[in-house]
């Protein structure tokens, strides 16, 4: 028996594992981006209400991207009609370009922190994003 197994058995005898949240229920680790032992550890961290920093950063980036796409979609919906709507669209495009550039810088920083390339995000193709919403 190794040292860790002895520690675990001693903790069990002391009752350190009694009355834990979710005791007797299977761990929910279905949405884990990891495999093997790392997957189980991530599931336990998540069940305890915590997350890894790079996963939180990724979620924030995806939320920022979604918010910018929504703003562009909303501006495009008002485009047909008066010249004022075209001014509104041009302003929305200008704001989108600025925020998308900031998001792309944040994506590059995030990709340096992510532990594996499978977690990387691709920078936004700003012109393609705008073209996708332009009526």
Image (spheres, helix red, strand yellow):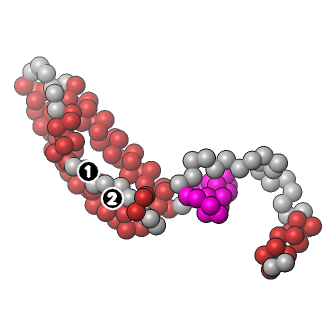
Q: Residue 9, how many percent across, how many down?
A: 87, 70
Q: Is residue 18 left or right of residue 22?
A: right
On screen, 86 above or below 96?
above
Q: Is residue 120 left or right of residue 7?
A: left
Q: Which residues are magenta?
A: 34-51
**Residue in the foreground of this view, choosing between 90 and 117:** 117
Q: Is residue 57 magenta?
A: no
Which numbered tag is attached to residue 43? none
Q: Secondary structure at mark 1?
A: loop
Residue 94: x and y, percent?
Answer: 15, 44
Q: Quadrant of the C terminus?
A: top left
Identify the residue shown where x is 61% and y is 47%.
30
Residue 115 shown left or right of residue 73 in the figure: right
Residue 6 visible? The answer is yes
Give whichever of discs 2 and 1 has the lower sequence position.
2
Assess disc 2: are there few (<14), some (14-19) or many (≥20) residues with their C-alpha within 10 Å of its C-alpha.
Answer: many
Circle 1 packing at 10 Å, graded few (<14), some (14-19), many (20+), is some
In the picture, measured across the screen, residue 3 lies left or right of residue 55, that is: right
Q: Is residue 95 visible?
A: no
Residue linked to disc 2? 107
Classify residue 73 by image quadrant.
top left
Residue ID at (37%, 68%) = 112
Residue that label 1 marks: 124
Give how far apart the Cα atoms at labels 2 and 1 are. 9 Å
Check whether the beta carbons of the residues at disc 2 and disc 1 lie within 8 A of each other. Answer: yes
């Amino acid at each position: 028996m190794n040292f860790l197994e002895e520690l675990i058995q001693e903790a069990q005898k002391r009752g350190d594992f009694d009355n834990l949240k979710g005791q007797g229920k299977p761990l929910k680790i279905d949405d884990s981006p990891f495999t093997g032992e790392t997957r189980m550890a991530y599931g336990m961290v998540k069940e305890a209400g915590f997350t890894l920093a790079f996963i939180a950063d990724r979620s924030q980036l995806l939320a920022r991207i979604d918010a910018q796409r929504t703003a562009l979609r909303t501006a495009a919906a008002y485009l047909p009609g008066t010249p004022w709507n075209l001014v509104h669209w041009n302003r929305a495009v200008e704001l989108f370009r600025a925020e998308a550039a900031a998001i792309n810088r944040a994506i590059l920083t995030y990709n340096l922190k992510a532990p594996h390339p499978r977690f990387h995000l691709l920078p936004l193709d700003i012109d393609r994003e705008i073209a996708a919403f332009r009526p």
